[in-house]
Image (tube, rainbow, N blue to C red):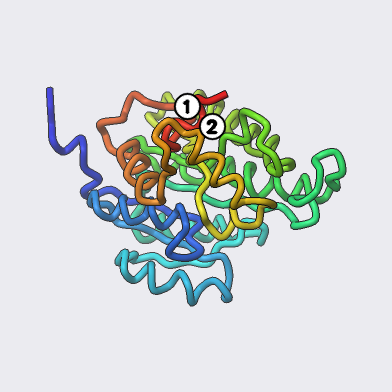
Amino acid sequence: MFDDRDRSLEGKKGLVIGIANRESIAYGCAEAFKHYGAELAVTYLNDNARSYVEPLASELEAPLFLPLDVQVPGQLEAVFEAIKETWGRLDFALHSIAYAPKADLHGRLVDSSREGFLTAMDVSCHSFVRMASLAEPLMVDGGALFTMSFYGAEKVIKNYELMGPVKSALESTVRYLAYELGPKDIRVHAISPGPLRTRAASGLKEFDELLADAMSRAPAHQLAGIEDVGIATAALATPAARLITGQTIYVDGGYHIMG
């Protein structure tokens, strides 16, 4: 009944979307995937980002290193076409991207623009649906899909504003995708870390205060690092987690249980 191979990603092929630099949650996950034995395809946002991401992709020994801006028509499809041509299959994929225009991100939700709201929803949520659609035919032996959320999807977090309903939609999307793809043994999860000092998170107003508050309130009195998030996500990608799906997995020192 017990098989040590169930705790391994040896021989598995995975896609990692969202590495911006060494502090990215996506990089913490990629390191863990690699440690457990997976071979990775890594994307970078644009030419400006390439110089930061390419050395990390080299460290990860990624055979596929591809540009991906989900707002550019055809780029996501090109990534999956390259995966199909190179590997012929895919075992897991990580979606760790989110975006909202700064004016909408820093303002009140009630004042958000239609364009800003739709942009945030497209990049942060619907691109995960598109990724799942393209991954489905390549996951011939089942697989796992992951996206990154935050506690602001469930409760009001000061200054999270526009991203709150966007992440709520993302977590609901996870549940429906898990339902639809479950018959093909494709599992779907949202990973919800506590506040982390990443480049994307630093764009929030009063972020240092949010970090301090989360650390003081979390039962563990410490916050997760990208390594903690990576290990938890990699474990869910292994066969040992084959009957866990549709969940929001909190990696936050217990922060989310506090009122």
Q: Which element type, helix, strand or loop, lies under badge 1?
A: loop
Disc 1 marks which amino acid? Gly
Rendering coords of residue 241 (x, y %): 31, 30
Q: Is residue 157 above or below residue 37?
A: above
- Residue 174: x percent and y percent? 54, 32
The residue closer to the viewer here, 24 or 245, is 24
Residue lying at 71% horizontally and 44% vertically, measured from the top left: 159
Q: In percent of the image, x 49 and y 36: which residue is there?
A: 190
Residue at the spot 43% in from the left edge and 26% down from the top edge? 182
Percent x, y for residue 34?
28, 55
Q: Are marks 1 and 2 in contact (CB under 8 Å)?
A: yes
Which quarter of the picture shows residue 42? bottom left
Label 2, residues with CA under 10 Å away: few <14, some 14-19, many ≥20: many
Q: Quadrant of the N terminus?
A: top left
Q: CA distance from mark 1 to mark 2?
A: 6 Å
Which residue is under mark 2? Answer: 174
Identify the secondary structure beneath mark 2. helix
User: Which numbered disc flags the more N-terminal residue, 1 or 2?
Assistant: 2
Whether residue 236 is visible here, answered yes or no, is yes
Q: Which mark is residue 246?
A: 1
